[in-house]
Amino acid sequence: MLLQASGVDTIDLACTLGSGWGEAAGQLGELVTEIDAEDVPGFHTSGVPGHSGSLKVIRTASRAHVLVIGARTHYYEGKGVDAVAHGVRTAAAAGAGAVVLTNGCGGLNPAWSPGTPVLISDHLNLTGTSPLRGAHFVDLTDLYSPRIRGIAKEVDSSLPEGVYAQLPGPHYETPAEIRYLGTAGADLVGMSTALEAIAARAAGMEVFGISLVTNLAAGISEEPLSHREVIEAGQEAAPRISALLAQIITRTLEES
């Protein structure tokens, strides 16, 4: 249905835009079509502020087609892990060979102030589940593409890298949990991305992840945590990080 509605033969790359990243879509190229998520089987309009609730197909200057997923389903919404993985699986079925996963997250490194973009080098899946079932063994050694991370570093050599931990949410973590995560090797913490990345790799896609630090994690800062803070940090950083992401995606498509 997605390809039919957009009138294109295939999708080249998919991009899931999390909190703070939504403006990137407008910098990728020409809008071919925009579809309400609920009009596409398997998708749901997100109830989370900061997510558009639509799917867009965009044609870049090089005539590549990008599927922008603004209707991410989070695990804590209670729709099941298949709903969480549905976006990347749909993109793979439409031909996308790569997926860009973005998010807004908490930072464990005090040097990363709100508004800092961080490349995801690896993850800790602490949701207690997997999008895979049965004897489906998938190697995740180099899950977050070294190639695309290299392209990102060429675009902006100052980009730091870190390990992202996905917890089920929707509550924020306690200071004790953040200390535990730091001991386990996490630099970033949030409620999305890892399950989608696993599903994307299982579908044969190249995966690139980038986080926006929207707040310091619990106990790192004395300030209380709130989703309003996440939205505000994303809005303030949006022009800068959206331009960055558009450049990374454009270069990735050119070098594919």
Image (cartoon, rainbow, N blue to C red):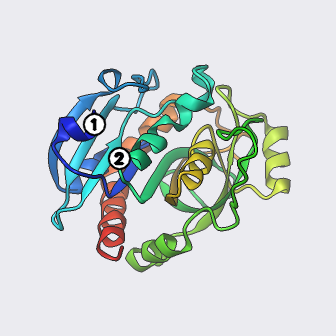
Q: Position of residue 150 (x, y in %)?
A: 49, 77
Residues 213 and 211: in front is 211
Residues 166 and 96: in front is 96
Q: Position of residue 233 (x, y in %)?
A: 45, 43
Name the amino acid type tagged 2. Ala
Residue at x 78%, y 44% (from the top left corner): 178
Q: Is residue 16 visible?
A: no
Q: Position of residue 231 (x, y in %)?
A: 44, 35
Q: Are marks 2 and 1 in contact (CB under 8 Å)?
A: yes
Number of dots carrying numbers: 2
Residue at x 39%, y 22% (from the top left corner): 45
Per the image, the residue denoted by label 1 is: 2
Q: Is residue 155 left or right of residue 85?
A: left
> What is the distance, in whole Å, between disc 2 and disc 1 at their CAs?
8 Å
Decide: is 88 above or below 66: above
Q: Residues within 10 Å of mark 1 (few under 14, many from 20)?
A: many
Decide: is 94 above or below 153: above
Per the image, the residue denoted by label 2 is: 94
Residue at x 51%, y 71% (from the top left corner): 149
Residues 61 and 157: in front is 61
Q: Is residue 20 left or right of residue 219?
A: left
Name the amino acid type tagged 1. Leu
